[in-house]
């Protein structure tokens, strides 16, 4: 996953989701659940890279930040529950997919 298109395309493969651009600043693409409108992926460009904010469990979030320089406390969101993934090619795609999957499930209505 290297660019905005790849990130959006991957997130849109989940069931009952939609792409949203609710801000005047078209830099932000949000992927939301149809049922509850909650966002599970915030996709944007910053510092010449695409970033994806995803929700995770606090202990795992901390571990991921320690393991990868390109996973940082979320830009503009709760730093305990959300991480930013910087798509700079240093994080294995399987790990990125797992973080997006976790965010999808944590934000889905039960």
Image (spheres, rainbow, N blue to C red):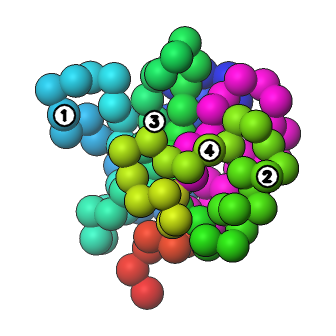
The residues bearing labels 1 and 3 have C-alpha atoms spaced at a distance of 12 Å
Q: Is residue 8 left or right of residue 86?
A: left
Q: Which mark is residue 72?
A: 4
- Residue 39 location (% of width, % of height): 37, 56
Q: Is residue 90 magenta?
A: yes
Instruction: Indicate which disc, 1 or 3, sits on the residue closer to the N terminus.
Output: 1
Contact check, label 1 and label 4, Cβ < 8 Å: no
Q: Picture coordinates of residue 16 (x, y %)?
A: 41, 61
Provide the secondary structure element on which disc 1 rests: loop
Q: Would you name the residue on which mark 2 appears?
A: 66
Judging by the rendered image, the residue that carries numbered circle 3 is: 43
Residue drawn at point x = 28 percent, y = 41 percent = 20
Q: Quadrant of the N terminus?
A: top right
* Residue shown at 41% from the left, 59% from the top: 78
Give how far across and how far down residue 98 sits, in percent: 73, 57
Dot 1 corresponds to which residue?
23
Range covered by the magenta-colored residues: 83-103
Cα separation, mark 2 vs mark 4, equals: 9 Å
Say whether residue 91 is magenta. Answer: yes
> x%, y% of residue 29?
36, 35
The tag earlier along the polypeptide, 3 or 2, is: 3
Tell which circle, 1 or 4, labels the residue nearer the N-terminal end. Answer: 1
Mark sitting earlier along the chain (3/4): 3
């Amino acid at each position: 996953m290297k660019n905005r298109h790849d990130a959006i395309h991957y997130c849109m493969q989940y069931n009952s989701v939609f792409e949203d651009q609710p801000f005047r600043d078209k830099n932000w693409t949000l992927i939301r659940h149809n049922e509850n409108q909650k966002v599970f992926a915030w996709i944007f460009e910053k510092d010449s890279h695409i970033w994806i904010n995803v929700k995770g469990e606090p202990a795992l979030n901390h571990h991921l930040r320690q393991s990868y320089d390109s996973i940082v406390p979320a830009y503009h969101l709760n730093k305990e529950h959300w991480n930013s993934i910087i798509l700079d090619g240093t994080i294995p795609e399987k790990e990125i997919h797992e973080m997006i999957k976790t965010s999808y499930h944590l934000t889905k209505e039960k």
